[in-house]
Amino acid sequence: MKLITAVVKPYRLDEVKSALRDLGIDGLTVTEASGYGRQRG
């Protein structure tokens, strides 16, 4: 078993879930997150 952690923009979530389903992955946990900080680069 592997643990994969990904940060996905909300508007892409349906595409990601569909792609995972196509790969035979039928379970995932979704948590909404927010943050702040000074962007650099």
Image (spheres, rainbow, N blue to C red):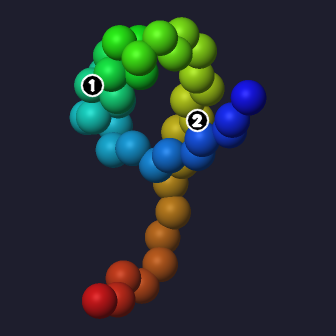
> Mark 2 sits on what residue?
31
Asked whether residue 5 is in view, the answer is yes
Q: Which of 24 and 35 lies nearest the eye of the viewer? A: 24
Q: Quadrant of residue 2?
A: top right
Q: Quadrant of residue 19?
A: top left
Q: Is residue 6 above or below residue 36?
A: above
Q: Tell me which residue sits at (47%, 11%) in the image.
A: 24
The answer to whether the residue labelled 2 contacts the one labelled 1, judged by CB atoms less than 8 Å apart, is no
Q: Is residue 11 above or below residue 29?
A: below
Q: Which of 21 and 13 lies nearest the eye of the viewer? A: 21
Furthest residue toward bottom: 41
> Mark 1 sits on what residue?
15
Locate the C terminus by quadrant. Answer: bottom left
Residue 10 appears at what percent x and percent y?
34, 37
Q: Is 3 displayed left or right of 31 in the figure?
A: right
Q: Disc 2 marks which amino acid?
A: Thr
Label 2 to label 1: alpha-carbon separation:
16 Å
Q: Disc 1 marks which amino acid?
A: Glu
